[in-house]
Image (spheres, rainbow, N blue to C red):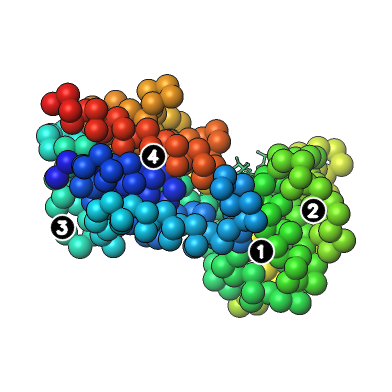
Amino acid sequence: MKCLIIGSGPAGYTAAIYASRANLAPVLIEGPQLGGQLTITTEVENFPGYPDGVEPFQMMDDLRRQAERFGTQFVSAIVDEVDFSCNPKKVWTDDGTLYEAETVIIATGASAKWLGLPSEKEYRGRGVSACATCDGFFYRGKTVAVVGGGDTACEEATYLANLCKKVYMIVRKPYFRASDIMQQRVFNNPKIEVLFEHNTVRLTGDQKVEGADLVYKKGLPEQEERHIAIDGFFLAIGHQPNTKIFAEYLDLDVEGYIKVDGDSPRTNIPGVYAAGDCADPHYRQAVVAAAAGCKAAIEADRYLNGH
Ligand code: NDP
């Protein structure tokens, strides 16, 4: 085949729209999370063309149907191995199927990070979550904590405040990293209490989360231990790019993001492109990912024409 696309977020679907309109007859392997990370947010308010906002599933379904209209084929599977040392490139999915493609567009996105506390693992699914939109409903009328100081943390805290009695935000720095508008929503919400300069040491509880031990001003003379009673603990501390299976062939940066050639989605292997959050530690926005998907498909078409 001419073009294989891995991933079904805004980058993957946009690459599929462009590649199918260029007659590359792409096959898109959807991966573990159909529609990508965006589908775990509540509402998309910043994608151009939706003045009233849009439900993430609706937006991803629109993109998918647009790609389908021009002939993209979709495969519901997870890629677990690749071999980019040969031409065509080889890609295997978890059901053992081998795909051979002259060009490959990687759009595998990124996944939520965890703090790495042993108790976090112990209580996963029993009070610990990395997705407020998915699990917030179970905490109606309860008290929860959100860890992180970025846009995701502010968005999740605001969302949870609509459902819960009280929301703590545990922020390790004395300030937020989030954009002003998101910070204002948090500060204006009487149900949210922000605990700046706090770190979580452990989660406590019998069978399920009932509290968290925190440290205030860790490592400073004023250091103090604190305990909060909570029913739910939500992680919102950023993301890890989903690039492990490509590490043998592609150049990655220290955080694991695929290195691309300046503004282009070209990787160190001709005919292999990376688009979206798997290659973007800076912007991590759906519209930026979509643009990168477009560029990747154009590059793939040019590469094929040159061969
Ligand atoms: P960010 O990387 O922006 O923020 C991560 C937050 O988690 C930071 O406050 C960071 O602290 C904190 N953190 C990281 N590791 C730890 C740790 N081990 N312990 C405690 N705290 C930790 O990630 P986001 O997911 O919030 O955002 C990613 C991108 O997506 C951003 O560009 C953001 O703007 C965008 N976004 C936009 C939205 C919108 O516009 N609607 C919604 C959601 C995300 P520190 O600051 O100290 O490093």
Circle number at residue 233: 1
C-alpha distance separating marks 2 and 4: 33 Å
C-alpha distance separating marks 3 and 2: 48 Å
Q: Amino acid at mark 1?
A: Phe
Choose the circle earlier in sequence order: 2 or 1.
2
CB atoms of marks 4 and 1 within 8 Å? no
Q: Which residue is mark 4?
A: 293
Q: Which residue is mark 2?
A: 186
Residue in the image at 60% along x and 65% along y: 133
Mark 1 residue element: strand
Horizontal and vertical percent position of residue 169: 75, 55
Residue 173 sits in quarter: top right
Horizontal and vertical percent position of residue 184: 81, 48
Residue 237 in view (yes/no): no
CB atoms of marks 2 and 1 within 8 Å? no
- Of tags 1 and 3, the one toward the viewer is 3
| Number of numbered discs on residues | 4
Q: Amino acid at mark 2?
A: Val
Mark 4 residue element: helix
- Of tags 4 and 1, the one toward the viewer is 4
Label 2 within 8 A of ligand 1 by Cβ? no
Q: Which residue is mark 3?
A: 97
Label 3 within 8 A of ligand 1 by Cβ? no
Label 4 within 8 A of ligand 1 by Cβ? no
